Image: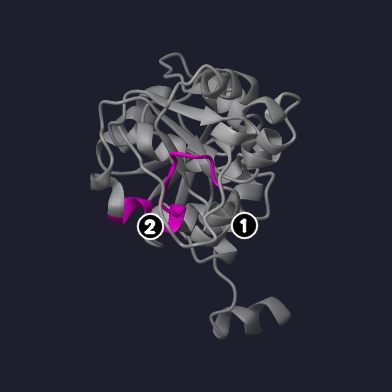
Amino acid sequence: MFLKRFRQKGLAHESLELVRVTEEELKRRSASGAVVVDVRLAIQFAEGHFPGSLNVGLASRMFAASVGVFLSKDSQIFLVVEKPEQASGAQADLARAEFDNVLGYIEAGDLTELHQLTQLSVFDLNSTLFRGGKPAILDVRPTGEWKSNGISGSRNIPISQLAARVSELDFTSPLVVVCQTGYQSAVASSWLQANGFDSIQHLLGGMDAYASAPFKECVEALSICSYQSGGSAAFQL
């Protein structure tokens, strides 16, 4: 009775029964406009994923909100999961956010045609900066966070604005994508790759890991700058 009253008020949603699909069916549905959301950890996604899929890790409480950054509520969604029980959990989280068209899932182990995504360690990035390299860096955090401790030379486009401002970026140049913890940059990196960016590098651990890197002190003058004055750093692609 309680659940029935919730549904009458529009506060709960009937969930479609999830079906397990084959790789061929997933390819067919994806080609017809369905969106594939991979709910595994970023490191698993990077090692091999369904071409064109969006990586939004289920383990975060930001899961449904992060899906909503790039997908409309009426999107037809298929899930890539590590194990079947993740599919029902993801469907429930998305239903609470009014994504009611989660139609099916596939286990990652059933995929044979895979794309990969490069992951960059903070040690490698620090080493590049220490040697005077100037990699193109995209920071997808809110602007205030970027201004307080952004990497020198980075460009800030908050993840919520990325789809609208993607034309500001060069599709062909290598691009390091950064956020605070690595979660949102993983989402952004997968979206950029799915939309034609050939050389995406996702910074593992984000600014949290970068700020605590052992030889951060060696490159501090080169790699971290303050934007308290409100100025913007140069960004070259």
Could you say where residue 6 lies in the image, as x and y percent from the top left?
A: 63, 81
Q: State the residue in front, 129 or 114.
A: 129
Judge the density around disc 1: few (<14), some (14-19), many (≥20) Cα neighbours within 10 Å.
some
Quarter residue 35 falls in? top left
> Closer to the N terminus: mark 1 or mark 2?
1
| Label at residue 93 | 1
Name the kind of residue labelled 1 in the image.
Asp
Q: Is residue 15 visible?
A: no
Residue at position x 69%, y 29% from top? 216
Question: Which secondary structure lies at badge 2?
Answer: helix
Question: Which secondary structure lies at badge 1?
Answer: helix
Could you say where residue 134 lies in the image, as x and y percent from the top left?
A: 42, 26
Could you say where residue 16 lies in the image, as x and y percent from the top left?
A: 51, 55
Residue at position x 69%, y 44% from top? 59
Residue at position x 53%, y 45% from top? 18
The colouring scheme, among rainbow, by chain, secondary structure or one colour, is one colour
Q: Is residue 126 visible?
A: yes
Q: Is residue 178 inside the magenta stretch?
A: no
| Label at residue 15 | none
Name the kind of residue labelled 2 in the image.
Gln
Judge the density around disc 2: few (<14), some (14-19), many (≥20) Cα neighbours within 10 Å.
few
Q: Is residue 194 above or below residue 150?
A: above
Residue beneath disc 2: 161
Quarter residue 158 falls in? bottom left
Is 64 positioned to the left or the right of 31 in the image?
Answer: right
Q: Which residues are magenta?
A: 150-164
Quarter residue 122 falls in? top right
